[in-house]
Structure formats: C-alpha cells, structure tokens
Amino acid sequence: MSGAAAGKTDIEKRICGWLADNRQGMLDLLEEVVNIDGGSYDKAGVDKVGDRFVRHFEERGLLTRIEPHEIFGNAIHVRLDDSPTNERPIVLMGHRDTVFPKGEPTRRPFKIEGGRAYGPGVADMKAGLVMNAFVLEAFKRMGGAPAPLAGLITSDEEIASPSSRPVIERVAREARCVFNSEPGRPTGNVVQGRKGGIFMRCEVLGKAAHSGGNFEKGISAIGELAHKIVALHALTDLPRGLTVNVGLVSGGQSVNTTAPSAEGRIDLRYVKPADRQFALSAIQRIVDTATVPGTTATLEILGEFLPLTQSGESEQLFDAYAAASKDLGMTVKGEFAGGCADSGFTAGVGCPTLCAVGPVGGNAHTSDEYLEVDSMVPRAQALALAILRLPPAG
Ligand SMILES: [Zn+2]
C-alpha cells in the first residue's frame, strides 16, 4: 500500500464523490429498512426487509439471487453484472435480522436527533447493509474494482446463523476476502479478532417426591444443577480468554417437591480455536458426573460462532483499510471483541476477513442503539478506497 497516501486517483475521487452525493439516499433507504419489522425468528419480516433491498438493487441494475430457506429468512446474493469470471470475488457481507420483538419499529420508529439516528437495528446492522448497497452501486457505475464484487445479505446472525452459516462458509471458500459491515466501534475502530462462542443447554433429571412426607424418596435435580454450575464456572480462565457462564436457570415443580428436573443455559467463550474442544470436553465431563446420586444429565448445543482469527492476509486487508481511512482523515485501529459475529465463519474457512467496517454506532441490542449519521459517508468511502487499493488478483 506504499504511496497510497499521496492523494487520490481519478477513479478514487469519482467514487468518493458519488458516495458523498448519495448521503441522503443512504439515509432514506436506512429509514425505510429500520421501520420494517425483522426479528431473527420472524421470517416474513426478515424477508420483507430483504425484498426492500432486492428492489433497491434491481432499480439500480445490480443482479440479485435469492437462496430460499423454509424456517428463517432467505439469503440474498448480489452481483454487479453477469459477466463470466474465474476470479475470486471481494464479498461485502451483512445480516438484516435484529434482536427486537415484533412491533418494535412501530413503538420506536427511525428518527434522527442531535446527529444520531435511532431505531431497531439502525447500527446493528442495517446501516452496514445500506452502506454495502451504495458501495456496490458505486463500483457498478464507475468500475475500478481489482476483482469482481459481490454482496451477501444474511438473515439470522443474531441467533448464531442456523440457516446462514452454510451459505456464508460456501461463499467465503470461493471469496478473495470478506468485509463484514457490523457497526464500527464507538471509537471508529474495526474488529480484527473475536471470541468463539457456544450456547448450550444442560438438562438434569431427578425424581419428584413430597418434600415433607417422602423427602428420602426424592432426588433433587436442582441440587445437582447447583453442583454443576459451580464446576462449570470454575472452568473460566480469564488470562486465557476462556469463560463459562450459566446465564439462565430453571427447574422444579413446586416449593414442596424435590425437583424432578432442572435446566441451565451455558455460554462458553474462547479465543484460541484449540480451546473449543478442550472446553467442550471439560463441560461434557461435568455434565456426565453426578454429585447427587441418581441424577442424570444431558448436554445440547443450541448455537455456535467460531472465533475470528487473524492471518497474514487478513492483516494486509486491515492495513489497506486503515491506510484508506487515514487518507480520509480518520485514524482506525483494529480491536479484539468478545462478541461473536458471522466473520468467525468466514475466517474459519481460511478467508481473509475484516469485521466492523460498517458506519459507527453503539449500544447495540438496546433501545439506546444509535448510529453516528455523519459516519455513513466516510465509512462507505473508506471501504471503497480499501477495495480500490487491493492489489489486482494474480
Ligand atoms: Zn450484528
């Protein structure tokens, strides 16, 4: 990337100028998609958000292909044109589902106040999808990309991508690199590393008995779950970046019955890929070991994200992005984040990946979620410049 700082080339100027001219268009589309309901389990809603993006692309001459899913929202693939190519594409990725319950956009519609936009999913990550759409269109209009460009809009990231993971992994295996447009950190930094995470359910079975009349005949599943929780939490090793959290417990039948069943929901986080098996084995041993005689227990994986890991190639991707941002007057560093994202799946199949290149925002998953409106255009420009300055394939 040497010499990149020496001013912009003609195509760089034209693309950055076009993106700046389309600020209002970006905000208009963002308002529309934020105001459409789309929680991860609401297939109809998530598909409605998808339809809006598809219409946007089709009106502007980009090509879309729907990959349907019966339970969750459909995946949407975007290309600039249908010219045949053997080159590996640069993929701009993002998810359109949100964590919010049905009706949230009606209760809390899109608004802009004091330079910040609010609304469900405004930063995480509908702004990133809007940004991707306009960057793709800029290259469609003006060309200049060093490789074919593609877009991928997924549907269920907030619940660990049960339907999108195989799609993401297939696309990433064929891609030259992936930019994931999760919101930029409040500092403007991007994310180079993320923890892996696994959500699990541990179900313990005991035996019900009247705790007054027949106490000795009962077997307390809650008593056993309590032992297991203490053992599970003891697996946490902060310096190693490994944490085990039982975040939900339930169980029992009544206060005067020995609990016939109990359940704990376990959240495992880790940094090193090898720690996945290490921790899973340790958790399974705890689940299989009964401290209260007569109890049995099972472990089930409910959802999983892989860690976002760094390679030499993804380091180059970051360098290109950071240099492009610098030319636009922004200092961008790479951060490590404990939160998981689809970028772990793309890195997991060996695809160079940079995450959180979306417009800057914060307080995701809360009603205080916000987007810095003035970051929309500069982040789009930084992404476009980073793409323009990637070396041609060869
Ligand atoms: Zn997200």
Image (cartoon, rainbow, N blue to C red):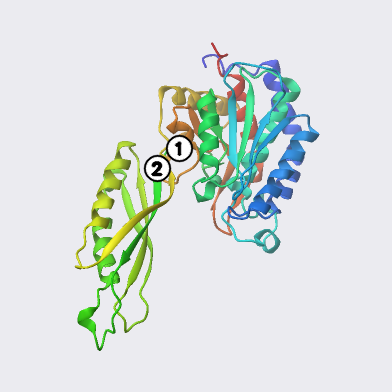
Q: Is residue 104 above or below residue 239?
A: below
Does dot 2 land on a helix, a strand or a loop? Answer: strand
Kindly indicate the quadrant of the structure image that contains residue 135.
top right
Is 153 on the left-hand or right-hand side of 294? right
Q: Which residue is mark 2?
A: 196
Residue furthest right in the image: 59
Kindly indicate the quadrant of the structure image that contains residue 207.
bottom left
Q: Which residue is mark 1?
A: 344
Does dot 1 land on a helix, a strand or a loop? Answer: helix
Disc 2 from disc 1: Cα separation: 7 Å
Name the amino acid type tagged 2.
Answer: Gly
Name the amino acid type tagged 1.
Answer: Gly
Is residue 191 visible from the viewing direction of this image? no
Task: Provide residue 214's location: percent of width, then percent of height.
Answer: 24, 85
- The answer to whether mark 2 and mark 1 are in CB contact below 8 A is yes
Is residue 147 visible from the viewing direction of this image? yes
